[in-house]
Amino acid sequence: MGEGDADARLMLRYAAGDAGAFDALYAAHRGALWRFIRRSVKDAAATDDVFQECWSRVIANRERYRPEARFATWLYRIAHNCCMDHWRKSGRRDRREAMDDGAIAAAADESLDGPVEAVLAGEASERLAAALERLPPEQRTAFLLYVEGGLSVAEIGEATAVNPETAKSRLRYAIARLKQSLGDDAPD
Amino acid sequence: MEQDQEPPFPREPWQRLLQDRADVPPETTDARIRAAARKAVAPRAARWWLPASLAASFLLAVLIVQWQYGNDEVPAVVTEADLAPPAVDEAPPAARMDSAPAQRKESPPRIAPFERAPVEVAPEPEARLGGPEQDLKAASEMVAEETDETDETGETDEPDLGASLAESGFDSREAPRPAAAAQAGALAKVRTPEAWYAAIAALRKAGRIEEADAELARFEAAYPDWLKEQGLSKP
């Protein structure tokens, strides 16, 4: 177990029957996971369903959990799969999901033609949220897993079933596009 | 890994921007997920007492039903007659049947507590003389004496018979009137009509008219047609 040993121990305790351990685990990850799912599915009503489905799978698979990786990696892999299932069911999966990194870069360039005035009118966080919604799903997922989930590049690759180089590439494109969207308000 | 050692960009500033929105799940969702988590790891020991409690409830229901239907004195249905104070058992049976026919059909007649005969202290033997038991005893002795005397002399000694009745304490006036018929039947069982007829005649001859009349009434109750059949007049 790595740095997430505390979470992994909580999960093991919960699997052993300690309901209080789950409460601690849930309190630590509920906000970030909620935001990750909300920005992934882009649907407030679906966010709640996917969020509950994600935790239901955590509960159902508690005895299968092995602390071979960080708990966050395991949790966000489940969350990513839940989002994928939601996209399949709703048929709203963006076609750009299947694009390679080159195509993703081209799509990111196209998105720069969006209404800059609208982006600049809101607060930085609002503009960031709007920019996130315009990101291709792979880049958005990589960015959210990195920022909200606290996963490393390798863990992002593990959670999304891609190699670390691909995960890193998606992450670079995502950050470049978000910086362009936020302009001077973008963090360094 | 190399990628982990050299992160592409710092997380914290972006996290601050994202978390400023205070976007959190609703409380109902939190409660639902926590409840599901607790339910999933609830002690399984609780699973055995649920069927056990169901079995106990079923057993209790069976016992109650058995007790209800197994006890004949307790009616299955409580009627107004059960709630009313118990009536004195002086009303004719027909009237009581009309008051609660359903109950009377299903349950046997009950004996109210106050209807039970009071516990009596056994009196001295002398105190019971004159009662039905003593009448039977006296009649038996009288019949035996008459039989002996008839065998010996061929005729009855009526004054002696009356004396024997007097000695035995037989007093028809003390006999309870409602039990006259039963008493007469009992006397008829222990002596022949001829002997009884002779005894009544002896009483009348001795001047004990009232006693003779009472005995005659009993005699006629026991043998209503005997005098006519024999062609005899009332003694």
Image (spheres, grey):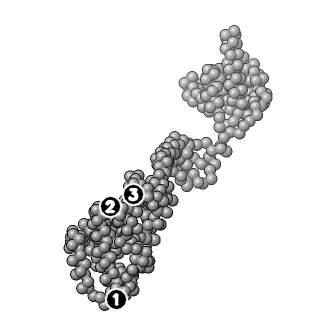
Q: Secondary structure at mark 2?
A: helix
Q: Name the quadrant containing residue B229.
A: top right
Q: Secondary structure at mark 3?
A: loop
Judge whether residue B84 can be spotted in this image: yes
Point out the tag, 1 or 3, that comes first from the N-terminus: 3
Q: Secondary structure at mark 1?
A: helix
Q: Name the quadrant containing residue B73.
A: top right
Residue identified by numbered label 3 = A69
Amino acid marked by disc 1 = Leu
Pick the quarter of the image with the N terminus of chain A. bottom left
Which labelled disc corresponds to residue A158?
Answer: 2
Point out the tag, 3 or 2, that comes first from the N-terminus: 3
Pick the quarter of the image with the C terminus of chain A. bottom left
Q: Residue at x 27, y 66 (%)?
A: A166
Q: Residue at x 31, y 71 (%)?
A: A171
Point out the tag, 1 or 2, that comes first from the N-terminus: 1
Q: Are marks 3 and 2 in contact (CB under 8 Å)?
A: yes
User: Residue A174, position in %: x, y?
Assistant: 30, 75
Judge whether residue B41 can be spotted in this image: no
User: Residue A152, position in %: x, y?
Assistant: 37, 65
- Distance, label 1 to label 3, CA atoms, is 40 Å
Residue identified by numbered label 1 = A120
The reply, left or right, for residue B109 in relation to residue B235 is: left
